[in-house]
Amino acid sequence: MFRGLANRTVFPALSSASTRRFISVQSLLHGSPEAKKAGELEVQQHSRLVARGKYLHGFEVHRVKPDSTDAYKKAAEKYYSAIKDDPKLHVKLTGSWETIVGELDTFLHILEYENYDGYDKSTALIRESDHTKAYKEMLPFLTSRSSQLTQEFAFFPTSPPRDQGGVFELRSYQLKAGALLEWEHTWRRGIEARRQFVAPVGAWFSQVGRLHEVHHMWQYPNLAKRKETREKAWQRDGWAETVSKTSQLANHMDSFILVPLSFSPLK
């Protein structure tokens, strides 16, 4: 970390014009206040263009010891049901799932907050309440955990609570930096081909945590019906083009098959 101080490079004296050019280059390399402000503004504009409403969704991923999944489920139900039902928190539990194809022994919980201010207030209240004790009851069963804050795409609002049964598919895309707006535009045009056969559960793009990431979720009666539905969509005009264009915008993508936990509002 301090290695550069031991071998400092001495630069020759610069003329005033050279000094200005040098400062300009340094600003470009290290990020001038103006450049940083412009970059932040661009991100905000993109978010406003593609996001729906004021809601913020927290993705909480828990990786559990293989021999502790049953104990974990009981502890998770206690915690997530409690915060969902606490009227002071204004937190909605969109759903809770277990992965059965993909990263096994992995659980996903999606929480809905009233934007960043609501997130700040809700998480502060949780830390100051007995809910913290319930959360800590899950920790002995975990091998790792991660979180991400996301917003909904305007064209893809999250489904309300329902009980349809079957399986869920979560598809996650790590986009190339700067590709979010193009991805959204392409999906907005092509999504109707899929809507004719299956209603989407929701779609989100990351705001905090791992950036340049997009998720969308679907629900099917079973994997055989999933295969049939996807094959029908490929026969519709526009869908093949949508998939081709969006795949070029992604560095990599994942598909996970999930089943809802007993207390999940979406199941």
Image (cartoon, rainbow, N blue to C red):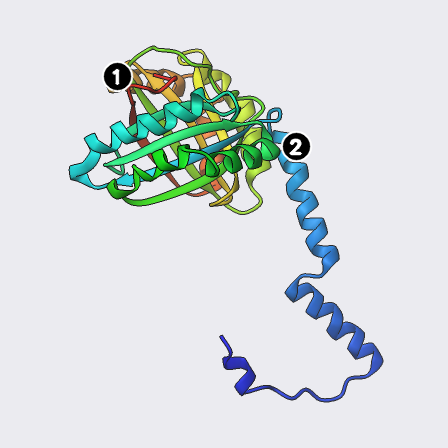
Q: Can residue 54 be spotted in the picture?
A: yes
Q: Residue furthest left?
A: 67
Q: Residue at x 75, y 68 (%)?
A: 24
Amino acid tagged 1:
Asn
Q: Position of residue 86 (x, y in %)?
A: 46, 22
- Check the image and report above or below for 235 versus 16: above
Q: Which mark is residue 188?
A: none
Secondary structure beneath dot 2 equals helix
Q: Position of residue 112 (x, y in %)?
A: 50, 26
Q: Position of residue 56 (x, y in %)?
A: 54, 30
68 on left or right of 81: left
Residue neighbourhood size for the residue with mark 1, other residues' Cα within 10 Å, grouped as few (<14), some (14–19), many (≥20): few
Given residues 76 and 50, the one toward you in this image is: 76
Q: Which residue is mark 2?
A: 48
Given residues 238 and 158, the one toward you in this image is: 158
Amino acid tagged 2:
Arg
Q: Residue at x 33, y 40 (%)?
A: 136
Secondary structure beneath dot 1 equals loop
Q: Alpha-carbon distance for marks 1 and 2?
A: 36 Å
Given residues 118 and 135, the one toward you in this image is: 135
Q: Residue at x 56, y 38 (%)?
A: 180
Q: Position of residue 256 (x, y in %)?
A: 31, 32
Q: Earlier in the sequence, mark 1 or mark 2?
A: 2
Q: Which residue is mark 1?
A: 222
